[in-house]
Image: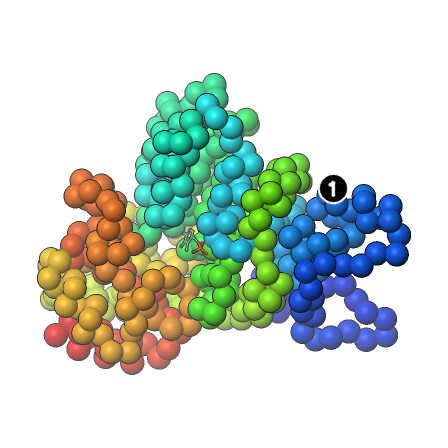
Amino acid sequence: MRPETRVVHTAFPDLEGSRPLAVPLHQTSGFAFTDLDTFAESMNKPDGAFVYTRLGNPTVRTLENAIADLEGGAAALATSSGMGAINAVLLAALSAGDHVIAQRSLYGGTHALLHDLTQRWGVEVTYVGGHDPDEVRAALRPRTRVLYLETISNPTGHVSDLPALAAAAGEDVLVVVDNTFASPLLCRPIEHGAHVVVHSTTKYLGGHSDVTGGIAVFARSDDHVRTWHHSIELGVTADPFAAWLTIRGLRTLALRVRRHEENAAVLAHRLAEHPSVRAVHWPGLPDHPSHALAAKLLDGFGSTFSFDLADKAAGRAFVTALELVHLAPSLGGTETLVLHPASTSHRQLSEEELRAAGITGGTIRLSVGIEDPDDLWADIAQALA
Ligand SMILES: *Cc1c(COP(=O)(O)O)cnc(C)c1O
């Protein structure tokens, strides 16, 4: 069946005789046993009987299986946040002295984590662009363990050439892809050579700005088991209610992603024609540098993108003049949000790093929601005026 059907029909264990339509919420921290040996054996593996919710929970497992299925993975590990998933995957894969090749334009929290790993844990990192496999080949070292990429980068909408970069990394390097901006509806990185896919489920998968969560999907079960062991030490477990809310959001993922993108297309085209707008960075526009790659790799162009106004004063004035669109962090919810990256999400970057990331003082990021596009445009037009 196609993803549009699979997101609605979440699989979960049957009862006898009939079954609930909604996924049951197992809001419990632990499970009681009648057999001591079953209890003991189940503590050492991710797929035994449920013991303690930090080790596994039926509602959390339902979410893990649903997203593993959408991404085409063997298993998944749901976590308390996107950063929880990224930490679990990287810390389980790396030891002091290991080397990581990472894309230069990374989510801020991931960038901070890699910085910390180099400063305090003896991990070395080489940064590369998202397109040139030769750059990855040149960066390889005997102790390169991880290649870390993002499908669509924030906020300029650059698409990574996942198949070319993954192939360049070779067999022994764990290829990890943050697929948050695309969602499995637009891209399934495992099909392009990724071993691990991470998401902030806080964004499109949950989709309603009411839950914080993350997930790592594994192509191979040994990577899953290793990361599970580490995650229970880290304690980044997803709470059952958070998992339940995410499953509820997942049911409308296909509808939402399509509507988000239709709205993004309307706004991107209108912004591109507006005299106050210097540039629009939506990969659906034919002049975007990633347009051809996005058309080849993705089943759509996404709905979080940026555009440039003249300068910082114009950027700051615009984001505070909006009335319907909220000035807020995060993305992927039903409501449209705006952000001024130079003042907030990317404030730690130097002038030079900002330029390399394609961000100016006038850059505005939009996470386009599912409202009526004319209402959104009316607000944006009055704020531009
Ligand atoms: C939000 C986000 C994260 C971090 O997720 P949290 O749920 O906030 O911890 C990681 N990667 C990307 C691309 C994100 O947008």
Horizontally, is 377 left or right of 11 in the view? left
Looking at the rendering, which quadrant does residue 247 occupy?
Answer: bottom right
| Residue at 37% across, 77% down | 371
Residue 132 location, x and y as percent? 35, 33
Query: Is the shortest distance between ligand 1 and the CB of mark 1 under 8 Å?
Result: no
Hey, which residue is sitting farthest right in the picture? 35
Residue 48 location, x and y as percent? 77, 48
Looking at the rendering, which quadrant does residue 41 occupy?
Answer: top right
Query: Is there any visible trace of residue 131 in the rendered image?
Result: no
Q: Amino acid at mark 1?
A: Asn
Count of numbered badges drawn on the protein: 1
Q: Nearer the viewer, residue 47 or 188?
A: 47
Crowd band around label 1 with a 10 angstrom C-alpha radius: few (<14), some (14–19), many (20+): few
Looking at the rendering, which quadrant does residue 102 occupy?
Answer: top left
**Image quarter in which the C terminus is found:** bottom left
In what element is the residue under mark 1? loop
* Residue holding disc 1: 44
Q: Nearer the viewer, residue 179 or 302?
A: 179
Residue 379 in the image: above or below residue 122: below
Residue 295 location, x and y as percent? 39, 52
